[in-house]
């Protein structure tokens, strides 16, 4: 495989990410989706590279009296740094998803809730003139205005 083929998807994703301008909620969704794809792609690639580097360095002969064990331990230590980077890439991808979920919670849900409450308020009977019923907040029965308590 050529380097262009390996980097093509990642390069396209980064180019798409750079082109996004935040104007609508759909742009935030696209940003989160692309950032998640970049994070997963980097996580997979760097994780595989960590295993490859550890395997290649583990084959180094090292000192004759350790039978190559010292090289394998050191190779795992070197690969562990790349695995840490792979985990960071995964967190990067998840940060986009969390950003969009937070946007939904703090901006979209209150709007939906306010709209629902407004619709409920329209369906209720509007307070008006009533006879025979005790209106809310009134002092007494209808027709009691002139009577002494």
Image: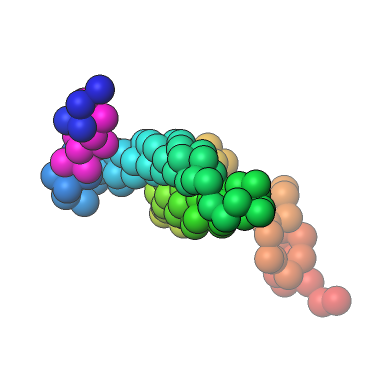
- On the image, the x and y values in percent for residue 81 come to 49, 57
Whether 125 is among the magenta residues is no
Residue at the image point whose x is 46% and y is 52% from the top: 82
- On the image, the x and y values in percent for residue 30 come to 29, 38
- On the image, the x and y values in percent for residue 94 come to 47, 47
Residue at the image point whose x is 53% and y is 46% from the top: 61
- On the image, the x and y values in percent for residue 26 come to 28, 39
Could you tell me which quadrant the N terminus lies in?
A: top left
Left or right, residue 12 beside residue 46: left
In the rendered image, the residue lying farthest to the right is: 149
- Range shown magenta: 5-15
Residue at the image point whose x is 20% and y is 38% from the top: 11
Left or right, residue 83 beside residue 42: right
In the rendered image, the residue lying farthest to the front is: 64
Which quadrant of the view contains residue 2? top left
- Closest to the observer: 118 or 149? 118
Placement of 125 over or under 80, stated as above or below: above
Chief secondary structure of the magenta portion: helix
- Closest to the observer: 45 or 54? 54
In the rendered image, the residue lying farthest to the top is: 1
């Amino acid at each position: 495989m050529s380097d262009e083929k390996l980097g093509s998807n990642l390069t396209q994703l980064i180019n798409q990410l750079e082109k996004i301008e935040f104007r609508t909620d759909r742009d935030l969704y696209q940003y989160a989706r692309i950032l998640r794809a970049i994070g997963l792609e980097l996580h997979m690639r760097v994780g595989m590279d960590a295993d490859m580097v550890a395997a290649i360095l583990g084959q180094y002969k090292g000192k004759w009296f350790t039978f190559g064990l010292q090289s394998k331990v050191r190779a795992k230590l070197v690969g562990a740094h790349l695995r840490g980077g792979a985990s960071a890439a995964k967190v990067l991808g998840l940060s986009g998803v969390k950003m969009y979920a937070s946007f939904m919670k703090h901006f979209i849900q209150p709007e939906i809730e306010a709209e629902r409450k407004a619709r409920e308020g329209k369906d209720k009977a509007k307070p008006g003139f009533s006879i025979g019923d005790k209106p809310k907040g009134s002092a007494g029965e209808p027709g009691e205005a002139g009577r002494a308590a």
